[in-house]
Amino acid sequence: MANIKTLAEFITERQHEFTYATGELTQLLTSFRLAGKMVNREVNKAGLAEDILGAQGSENVQGEQQQKLDVYANDLFIRLLRSQGEVCAVASEENEEIVHFNNGGKYVVTMDPLDGSSNIDVNVSIGTIFSIYRRISEGETATMEDFMQSGTAQVAAGYIIYGSSTMLVYTTGHGVNGFTLDPSIGTFCLSHANMTTPEEGNIYSVNEGNYFDFSEGVRNYIDDCKRQNMSGRYIGSLVADFHRNLLKGGIYMYPATKKSPNGKLRLLYEANTLAMIVEQAGGMATDGTTRILDLKPTELHQRCPLYIGSKGMVEKAMKS
Ligand code: AHM
Ligand code: MG
């Protein structure tokens, strides 16, 4: 029988790669590991539980309907992060303001606790996206400055995909590794070691319903993908689209539209995290002109256009 390595073992084994105190990273990742399992349990029974399925009735800061599972996941991640002491504050896609723990913790977290939430009710893959930054302020309470660091300052970035199987994928800047949850023992096991993404791919992922709202350059690029008989694949769950393209080679695009000149996705909760992961896997992420990780955030819920995936494809899209 092949050796099985659990996520917990892997984190401990690789913690020396972390620049700061080693135990801290273990603590931080443990919260995501545990919360991921708990969200996974709820996601899997979503079809059964009346009180979990469906809209919560409230709207988030972007004016979108919050689904109950979004709220559940958000509360859970915040509760677990608060309880372990390393994290001083969290910025979540679901909260208008920073959630402060006032505990002097050395890290801050940004997250989208449940992305692609319009897919919950229809049994389609959804995901959690998270990033960890070292605080730059001192004292009990984190500041806005801690969250306005560019993506290059991330000390860890990861996602959990709740799909036909559940996986946690993360990087601390030393490559990307993926772990699949074995539900029978409730443990994430290393299944995708040292993940790399192909330089070129054959998949383009974009909401083509917006085609006529895209710039001429973007339309030209999409036309070119078609001329090459590429596969168009768009789930509408960023984590799922990203994960597939990472493994198979492809590009995911959420360009600017006439209605949304900065696109739809958020720099802090979505773009920066996946940009760090894709670069660690040998891919590329830009907003059309600038490397995502070099963008300097100016506000928490800032949006940016996103072109992410195989290097050759992203480069070509930028030139179109
Ligand atoms: P959400 O954070 O409100 O769930 O929105 C993000 C999602 C992404 O997962 C997905 O790629 C995109 O929105 C789909 O948007 P659209 O329906 O406009 O194509
Ligand atoms: Mg989201």
Image: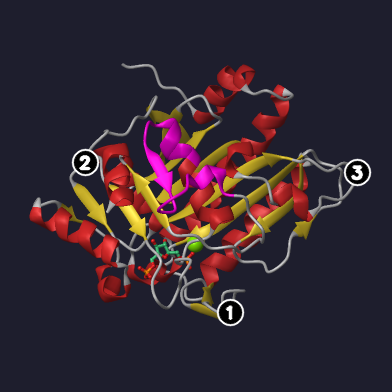
Residue at the image position 65 percent from the left and 30 percent from the top: 26
User: Between disc 3 and disc 2, whose residue precedes?
Assistant: 3
Amino acid on which disc 2 is placed: Gly
Left or right: 202 in relation to 240: left
Q: CA distance from mark 1 to mark 3?
A: 33 Å
* Contact, mark 2 vs mark 1 (Cβ under 8 Å): no
Task: Please name whichever residue, 32 or 16, is drawn nearer the observer in this view of the structure.
Answer: 16
SS category of the residue bearing label 3: loop
Mark 1 Cβ and ligand 1 under 8 Å apart: no
Residue that numbered label 3 is attached to: 139
Residue at the image position 56 percent from the left and 41 percent from the top: 33
Dot in front, 3 or 2: 2
Q: Which mark is residue 201?
A: 2
Q: CA distance from mark 2 to mark 1?
A: 37 Å
Q: Residue furthest bottom?
A: 57
User: Between disc 2 and disc 1, whose residue precedes?
Assistant: 1
Q: Quadrant of residue 79?
A: bottom right
Task: Please name whichever residue, 225 or 20, is drawn nearer the observer in this view of the structure.
Answer: 225
SS category of the residue bearing label 1: strand
Residue that numbered label 1 is attached to: 59
Amino acid on which disc 3 is placed: Gly
